[in-house]
Amino acid sequence: MDRNLVLNLARVTEAAALNGAKWLGRGDKNAADQAAVDSMRKMFDTIDISGTVVIGEGEIDEAPMLYIGEKIGQRHEDSPKIDIAVDPLDGTNAVAKGGTDAIAVLAVAPEGHLLNAPDMYMNKLAVGPKGKGVVSIEKPIEDNLIALSKALNKDMSDITVVMLDRPRHDDYAQRIRKMGARIRFIQDGDVLGAIATCFDHVSGDILIGSGGAPEGVLAAVALKCLGGQFEGILLPKDDEEKARCERMGVECDKVYTIDDLVKGNESAFAATGVSHGELLDGVNFISKNVATTETLVLRQETGTVRFIKAVHHLDKKPEYAK
Ligand SMILES: O=P(O)(O)OC[C@H]1O[C@](O)(COP(=O)(O)O)[C@@H](O)[C@@H]1O
């Protein structure tokens, strides 16, 4: 994966964040999503790649842009062939309601290296590098918490589980409380929730629970770049979703390890904060034509972790970046 291409990814998520953020708290999640999608799509076409969207806004008949299978980028004869996973706005509800931790996010890998995850729920487990190898999605949460507290050298009462705040996680919540561990409930955005396990200054030692499978692949790329562990099991809710798994060539009961979700060692990841979060600042509109962003860029091959703070002069942006 070309190192300059990886830096260019920041431009794509920045553009999506800048435009998505205009909709903060305005109660219109579709408009927020659309703004982020349009900007991401336009910016991709300025980049020298022969890209295929493998995780995107839906099937071709559901989404006019960034649909699964869409070919994007400049697509010269010698442009690198890469697979792209996007979520132009992870946290559409959060943006609409003026909430925190929404991001514009994408991941890339050489052609054929990202799992084509269908849009359904996935049961997930993520831990950072220090907890890698001691937990398993197949083990009871109690065993995982004991193993993690040993590996991290933390008292159980200091272990923090990150989980989407959903009624379907009530059983987990009860069991975690019984063990004496803490829970950080997130309203949305389990890509950031998984990434939190890799940064000491953000609260969260393990992410568990179910969320979107596409977001699972995005999180897996980030965790692979950061040296963490991620596992996922697809959760089709009915026969229709089971049939979709079959059509897409993915298995329902299989534990997908990080290496199944992201093959090889050449993936990369970028996320720009849309609304304020613990890890990334949101877009801050400073004055009529000036806004700031913060972007996390990860490159698996070197393990480099970049936080890019940018000041944007919106009146000087070329057409493709507006
Ligand atoms: O809200 P649900 O149905 O529990 O789904 C959880 C999923 O939704 C999100 O919170 C937000 O996703 P979108 O904003 O892209 O729709 C994901 O991060 C998460 O994986």
Image (cartoon, rainbow, N blue to C red):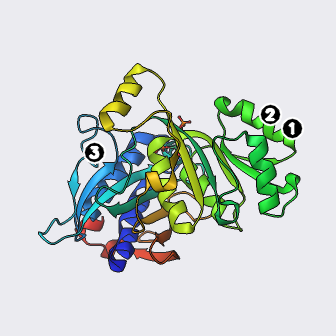
Which residue is found at the position 37% from the left and 73% from the top?
6
Q: Label 2, secondary structure: give it.
A: helix
Q: Which residue is mark 1?
A: 178
Q: Quadrant of the N terminus?
A: bottom left
Q: Quadrant of the C terminus?
A: bottom left
Q: Which residue is mark 2?
A: 174
275 or 265, which is in the foreground?
A: 265
Specify which label sits upstream in the sequence, 2 or 3. 3
Q: Label 1, secondary structure: give it.
A: helix
**Label 2–label 1 contact, CB within 8 A:** yes
The yes-or-no answer for disc 2 within 8 Å of ligand 1 is no
Amino acid at pointer 1: Lys
Q: Position of residue 90 (x, y in %)?
A: 48, 49
Asked if 244 appears above or below 98 in the picture, the reply is above
Crowd class of label 2 (few under 14; some 14 to 19; many from 20; radius 10 Å): few
Inspect this view and state whether residue 74 appears.
yes
Which residue is found at the position 73% from the left and 39% from the top?
140
- The label nearer to you, 3 versus 1, is 1
Which numbered circle lies on residue 67?
Answer: 3
Question: Which quadrant of the view contains residue 43?
Answer: bottom left
* Separation of marks 2 and 1 at Cα, in angstroms: 6 Å
Crowd class of label 3 (few under 14; some 14 to 19; many from 20; radius 10 Å): many
The answer to whether 173 appears left or right of 95 in the picture is right
Q: Position of residue 289 (x, y in %)?
A: 40, 71
Q: Position of residue 167 (x, y in %)?
A: 67, 29
Amino acid at pointer 3: Tyr
**Label 2–label 3 contact, CB within 8 A:** no
